[in-house]
Amino acid sequence: MKQTIIIALLVVLVAGGAGYYLYSRNKLQQMASSTGMTQGETPTSMTQQGTTQNNQGAPVTTIPTAKPLPSPIPAVSQITLALTSPSDKSTVTVASVVVKGHTVPAADIFVNDTEVTADAGGNFTAQVSLDEGDNIVTVTANDSNGSYAEKDFTVTYSPAQ
């Protein structure tokens, strides 16, 4: 019984070691292929481990270092966003304005708290309520690829007297 347990433990240890070796080897191959290295080549950014001497003649051990791998997450890019009305720093006498603009077709548009979708030509309109005085309006466009654009403008609401 004890021999069976010992043999089972040895099998698990050997299998675990072999699995770790294969995993490490696969990771190194992936790293090499993502950086353009060939098999057996070491990264140029790595330093060899070894011993050198400092100014006083004492031994100093160097440790290998490497550049970080490039991020697998693609950078988010910007899309076009043009606002046609109202113009920045305009003054209106009514408590709401219709924001009009153009972006990529079918983009999700957020005008402050109002959400609309651009039509097939990329055009959009959204009505926004205003408070008396200066109002900052933020327009954000997001497409299905995760790209975005954002613009702010100010509209002043001055009620008619």
Image (cartoon, rainbow, N blue to C red):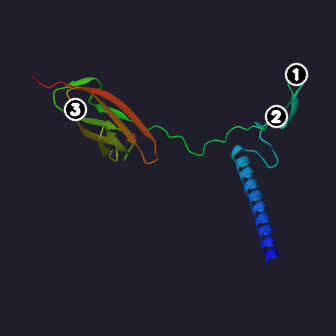
Residue placed most toward the observer, 139 or 101: 139
Q: Which mark is residue 130?
A: 3
- Check disc 1 and report the residue beneath it: 56
Q: Could you say which quadrant of the image residue 54 lies in?
A: top right
What amino acid type should be assigned to the residue bearing mark 3?
Answer: Leu
Instruction: Identify the mark nearer the N-term, 2 or 1.
Output: 1
Q: Label 3, secondary structure: give it.
A: loop
| Tag in front: 2 or 1 | 1
Outermost residue on the right side: it is 57
| Mark 2 Cα shell of 10 Å, populated few (<14), some (14-19), many (≥20) | few
Instruction: Identify the mark nearer the N-term, 3 or 1.
Output: 1
What amino acid type should be assigned to the residue bearing mark 2?
Answer: Thr
Q: Label 1, secondary structure: give it.
A: loop
Q: Is residue 141 left or right of residue 154?
A: right
- Check disc 2 and report the residue beneath it: 62
Q: Return the x and y of residue 107 as percentages of the image width and height.
A: 38, 45
| Tag in front: 2 or 3 | 2
CA separation in Å, label 2 and label 3: 64 Å
Q: Is residue 20 above or below residue 44?
A: below
Residue 80 visible in the displayed image: no
**At 46% from the left edge and 37% from the top edge, which residue is drawn?**
78
